[in-house]
Image (tube, rainbow, N blue to C red):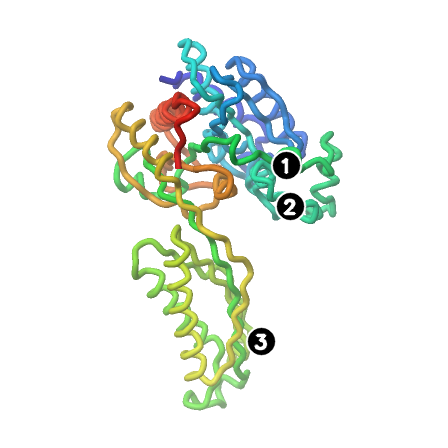
């Protein structure tokens, strides 16, 4: 079992780094604040008895050796960068809980067949460059030189920021792991929602990470005088947009797993006495099952074109991004279920609507996640909070899961 007081103390101490005026923390990639955070986490890794290094994309890694050093490694971790004015738990919990789990194993003299590595991944959030999961993409071997051309608001590219931080952008390929060398990945994270809180449970088993489909709907009608144009002959772009939004609400809510959000709306000309001639809005559509998500998309699309035809307006739908959902592997979920039984907690299952580093590993290794309860479902905010007891429950589940995955003999494989 982990040391809950030690874990909580470390969470509080890390939360002091990058404290922002106005509340919360700001720790962006390749900044002095993140470097200070890395130095602190490095000290915790060394205190835990781990071998510590940074790889070619800046991932901070701590390794507990296994009885067979050549055996495939079990990976765990999360990130310690933040959004602007973020909280103390999103990311850091997964890193610090993993460190405490490995430290507790060493303190209790527990050896595993497979080595275990905890990784603080570089820039999961993407707050600085509007391009996230740099570290996990590097490990998965999908990070490209083109990706490193992304720039922040000051015009600094990822490649330039890496150089300033002592890294060589030309060497990012060396951070990639080979599938035969990685046995599994398991991550502990706060839920960032209200499902566990509603169920009055401290932790849950994640079934998969939803893949977002982002689209822009562009509706072109005809602007006109609000008082001089009869209702029967209007070509009101906003009315069509509103009806499509209602269709999105209906279709996304049918199956209980899909979620659809209209987050941006722009109406032109925008006068109080002018019939809208153009309306644009965005759709964020998510599900952990790609086929289900795409079926909902098809129904929305068909209804949208039908609505626009009846309203006498033109519709264009543009894809902004289409990310493949990533299911959690049955083998890792089984290990997590065993951990719940050992720790003595009731099991429940829920999807992850938010993206996480683990989704980058769909072609690298079996992946799984554990969530703990978030107070009021708040995240990416200074009010983000999970209790000391819930953090301890999650860390103990993580520890037991790691043991299950890492004690298996080398010639025993998981799917």
Please say whether residue 388 is visible from this viewpoint.
no
Disc sitting over residue 29 in the figure: 1
State the quadrant of the N terminus.
top left
* Position in image of residue 386 (x %, y %): 39, 32
Q: CA distance from mark 1 to mark 3?
A: 40 Å
Q: Are marks 2 and 1 in contact (CB under 8 Å)?
A: yes
Q: Which residue is mark 3?
A: 269
* Vertical comparison of 235 with 90: above or below: below
Comparing 220 with 266, the one in front is 220
Element at label 1: loop
On the rendered image, what quadrant is the C terminus found in? top left
**Percent x, y of residue 225:** 53, 86
In three-dimensional space, the C-alpha distance between marks 2 and 3, rounded to whole angstroms, equals: 32 Å
Q: Is residue 73 left or right of residue 294?
A: right
**Dot label at residue 129:** 2
Q: Which mark is residue 338?
A: none
């Amino acid at each position: 079992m982990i040391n809950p007081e030690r874990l909580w103390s470390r969470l509080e101490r890390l939360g002091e780094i990058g404290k922002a005026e106005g509340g919360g923390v700001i720790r962006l990639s390749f900044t002095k604040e993140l470097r200070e955070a890395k130095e602190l986490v490095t000290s915790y890794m060394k205190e835990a008895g781990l071998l510590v290094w940074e790889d070619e994309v800046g991932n901070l890694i701590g390794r507990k050796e296994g009885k067979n050093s050549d055996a495939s490694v079990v990976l765990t971790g999360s990130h310690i960068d933040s959004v602007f004015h973020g909280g103390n738990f999103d990311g850091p919990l997964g890193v610090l809980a993993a460190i405490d789990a490995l430290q507790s194993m060493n303190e209790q003299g527990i050896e595993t067949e497979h080595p275990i590595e905890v990784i603080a991944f570089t820039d999961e959030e993407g707050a600085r460059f509007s391009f996230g999961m740099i570290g996990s993409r590097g490990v998965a071997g999908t990070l490209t030189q083109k990706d490193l051309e992304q720039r922040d608001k000051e015009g600094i590219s990822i490649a330039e920021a890496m150089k300033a931080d002592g890294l060589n952008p030309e060497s990012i390929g060396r951070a990639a792991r080979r599938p035969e060398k990685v046995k599994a990945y398991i991550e502990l994270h706060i839920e960032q929602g209200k499902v566990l809180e509603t169920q009055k449970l401290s932790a849950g088993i994640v079934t998969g990470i939803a893949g977002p489909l982002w689209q822009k709907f562009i509706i072109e009608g005809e602007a006109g005088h609000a008082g001089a144009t009869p209702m029967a002959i209007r070509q009101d772009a906003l009315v069509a947009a509103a009806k499509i939004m209602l269709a999105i609400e209906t279709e996304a809510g049918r199956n209980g797993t899909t979620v659809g959000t209209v987050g941006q709306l722009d109406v032109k000309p925008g006068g109080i006495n002018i019939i809208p001639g153009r309306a644009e809005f965005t759709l964020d559509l998510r599900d952990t099952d790609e086929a289900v998500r795409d079926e909902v998309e098809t129904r929305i699309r068909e209804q949208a074109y039908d609505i626009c035809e009846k309203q006498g307006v033109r519709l264009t739908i543009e894809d902004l991004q289409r990310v493949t959902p990533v299911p959690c592997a049955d083998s890792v979920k089984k290990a997590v279920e065993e951990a719940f039984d050992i720790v003595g907690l009731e099991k429940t299952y829920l999807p992850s609507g938010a993206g996480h580093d683990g989704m980058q590993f769909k072609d690298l290794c079996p992946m799984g996640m554990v969530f703990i309860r978030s107070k009021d479902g708040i995240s990416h905010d200074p009010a983000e909070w999970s209790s000391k007891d819930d953090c301890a429950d999650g860390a103990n589940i993580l520890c037991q899961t790691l043991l299950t995955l890492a004690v298996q003999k080398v010639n025993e494989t998981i799917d």
